[in-house]
Image (cartoon, rainbow, N blue to C red):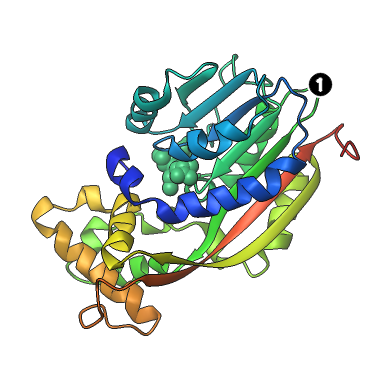
Amino acid sequence: MNNPELYRKANACQRCDAQQIIKEYFPQLNWNGKDSLIDLGTGSGDVLMDFVHPSLPCNFQRLVGSDINPKMVDYAQHEYGHHKNVEFRILDMATRKNLPIDLRGQFDHVTSFYALMYASDLRQTLSNILDLLRPDAGGDCLLLTLIHHHVYLSYKILAAMDKWWKYMYNMDSYIPPQIYWKNPMHKFENLMFGSGFSECHVDIQSKIFTYDNVEVFRTNMEAVCPFLPRIPQTLQSEFMDDLMYHSFQIIGINYYTMNRRAISPIPHRVAVIYARKLGQIGLK
Ligand SMILES: C[S@@+](CC[C@H](N)C(=O)[O-])C[C@H]1O[C@@H](n2cnc3c(N)ncnc32)[C@H](O)[C@@H]1O
């Protein structure tokens, strides 16, 4: 995911889900009026600034957007860095190194929208989230992550094809283990409690996002496809055609004969995880 402008242009589905979750869950967060919040995997920054930022208490102290990709951080900094008490930082949420001193234990809230599924090590990421929260006042986190999408099955089909396999090495590391979990609610709860959270609520939601047309869906898939940068530019369009063909075939639609200008409803499944750090039980 190397192109912030492309992602920003085509992230309607991610924006829609994040907006709904923020509206639903933010009133339940443990606000103190002078809150500090860090978001992990902030990407182009628009979800953070369009939905999280306006939902913070007006006297919030600090809002940090973070991402592993310097291009995303530069873009977000350029677009939104001028806002008061807002900063953007490079951070690998799954890092095994010590968290930077000015981030560790500094936050009342941690959020992450559509990014947890990219973390190379989920347990380490959850432990880092716990460490980002203040040691004294506890704190809470709200995480939205994808747990099922047809595109992952399409990746597998393409990786078995002669023309694409050589560009899709390490494919399994780009497919989140969550899509194989039989009981994601139970699994996430166990992981959260195992990481040291004292309270946890997991909601599994099946969703259908209606893209304005097929091209918008294709651009979204292009923006998030981890294999595209490995493919020569002259073959990228053919790769996307194949990816679209198989993604639609899975839901019984022929990509080549369908009306590409018609709205395109695409199903997916997400997990919404809300958890509190020790010391916060029963406060709200
Ligand atoms: C699909 S985008 C989501 C962006 C934004 N949160 C939104 O909802 O539109 C996922 C982002 O996670 C970032 N990312 C992937 N792995 C990461 C990691 N280990 N640590 C931090 N960010 C990561 C990617 O660079 C990308 O910007």
User: In this image, 189 relative to 61: left or right?
Assistant: right
The quadrant in which residue 75 appears is top left
Mark 1 is surrounded, within 10 Å at the Cα level, by few (under 14), some (14 to 19) or many (20 or more) other residues, namely few
Please tell me which residue is depicted at 44% across the width and 37% down the height of the picture: 46
Please tell me which residue is depicted at 32% across the width and 38% down the height of the picture: 4
| Amino acid type of the residue tagged 1 in the rendering | Asp
Residue 98 in sight: no
User: In this image, 163 relative to 206: left or right?
Assistant: left
Which x, y percent locates residue 283? 89, 36
Which x, y percent locates residue 168? 28, 58
The quadrant in which residue 77 appears is top left
Q: Nearer the viewer, residue 278 or 163?
A: 278
**Is 19 above or below relative to 176?**
above
**Is 229 above or below relative to 171?**
above
User: Can you say which quadrant of the picture contains the C terminus?
Assistant: top right
Residue 113 in sight: yes
